[in-house]
Image (tube, rainbow, N blue to C red):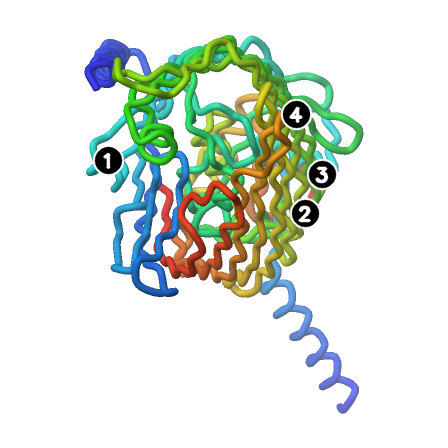
Amino acid sequence: MLKMKLWSLSVIGLMCSLLSHADIQFSGFASVVGGQTTSGKGDAFLADYSLVGLYDDDLSFQPETTMGLQVIADLDLGLSFTSQWVSRGLNNFESEISYAYLSYKLSPELTLQAGRKRLPLQYYSEFFDVGFAYPWIRPPADLYTWQILNYNGISLDHKTRLGKGTIGTSLYIGREDSTNNRLMSTLFFNEETNETWKNIIGIRSDYSLGYFQALISYTNFKLDRSFTSPDSTEEPVSNSNVDFFATSFNFDNGQYLFLSEINHWASSRFAATNWLLSLGYQVNNFTPYMAFSEFSQEEKIANEDLEEHTTSSLGLRWDFHPQAAFKVQFDDIQDKGSLELVGDAQAITFGIDLVF
Amino acid sequence: MKQFKRYIFILSLMFIGMNACAEIAIIVHLQNTVKLNKTDISQLFLGQVSSFPNGAIAIPVALSRDNNSREIFNETVLNKTENQYKAFWSRLVFTGKASPPSEFKDSSQLRDLVSKNPAFIGYIDSRRINDTVKVIATF
């Protein structure tokens, strides 16, 4: 927490010292989301794995309500500084820094960024918090289950024309230390667990051509895991190699919407393959949609299935205002793994997303 | 007489038609020699590239929401409703990938800006064109 406060202070300090020479732009987003399980007493719906956003059979607005404020200080001549604060119901709306980075345009095609950013592992990773940017209440939870969401490091972004389309490529390196990691400590080990992803190196490319968009990405990092308690009986992990691949293919012609992703990750002991498929139809500011996603993890040495869950979703997005949308979604979760995380559940969630 | 009435009828239809779908013009600086098709223009206004095909820096500028031409441009050239445009841009804005085109309330203000800097590209209602800017496409 102290670390966060220091970050905030230095960011505010930097902002103030820049004020006199910079053009300042404010923007932001908010998602107010409520929901509950409908399948019966005692059922829980894990809507957000990373931060353990859990709905139960009582209506709650805490698990997914999120607000963000972004400030960009444009110093001209290609240099800018961006900071994004995010407040979540899960953290009693205490704000934390999601992005804080310097950006320098080396040429119209090439940009260097350094600081704190969201880790761009998958298609929705970087704008996961911005509900207005996608049709659903949330990107399907089965695929967005990482315990680490951010990194401190450097990225190099390039964009150019390729054939009749455009291609954007990012290279990134960095590291993230997470003390008392939320997902690991509360859901997997039931004790204070510390995670470090070090030597993170990754590359991703997005290709856009008319109505089509494709993404491929690859990330490699070394994982350290330790347990704070000296009495812990869990085995710490040191320098475990993790490879992660993701690919997405999307089609959007303003009327029909086809969204998909397949990803695969592997460490020396575990491997998982996950996928999602979603279809939508956009007419007069209404977008009815459906989605199906699956997470499937196995232990490689004993070759046994561990965690396995699927989600079937039906929902409606209604853009009732040029900068706001109302959404309502029904989810049916089947927990099929031998390592049962939260069990089967059905849930209804609804909310309003806006951007400014 | 019958013939005449028919002419009047057709003429008035044409007049209504012209007003209902006012044309928009894509404008650049007088010295800018770029040739752009609809795809090129769309790529610039959606932040997918930030230079003209000849490599020169391109800065797209847009009209604000209370301007009719914005809706026509977004739907005809970008194939997006206002909300789809906002949703698309929010993916770039909040991830540090690009900033959306600056927005102007007044199309003559936008036109004056384009007339002064070869990097700018914008769109205005065709009826607001004058000889200070070059039209490279109409929709």
User: Are the residues flagged by discs 4 and 1 from a single subunit?
Assistant: yes
* Earlier sequence position, callout 2 versus callout 1: 1
> Where residue A155 sits in the image (x, y, percent)?
52, 13
Return the residue at label 1: A91
Amino acid type at circle 4 is Ser
Along the viewing direction, whichever of A199 and A169 lies nearer the viewer: A199
Q: What is the CA distance from the residue labelled 4 to the residue labelled 2?
A: 17 Å
At mark 2, the secondary structure is strand
Which amino acid type corresponds to the residue marked 2 in the rendered image? Phe
Residue A73 as seen in the image, left or right of residue B116: left
Label 1 neighbourhood size at 10 Å, few (<14), some (14-19), many (20+)? few
Which residue is identified by label 2?
A251
Q: Secondary structure at mark 1?
A: helix
Where is mark 3, residue-wise?
Answer: B39
Marked residue chain, label 1? A
Q: Which residue in the rendered view is the most extreme toward the bottom?
A: B2
Say whether residue A33 is left or right of residue A156.
left
Going by the numbered disc 1, the residue's amino acid type is Asn
Q: Which residue is mark 4?
A: A205
Query: Could you give the CA–CA distance between mark 4 and mark 1, rounded to whole angstroms?
Result: 33 Å
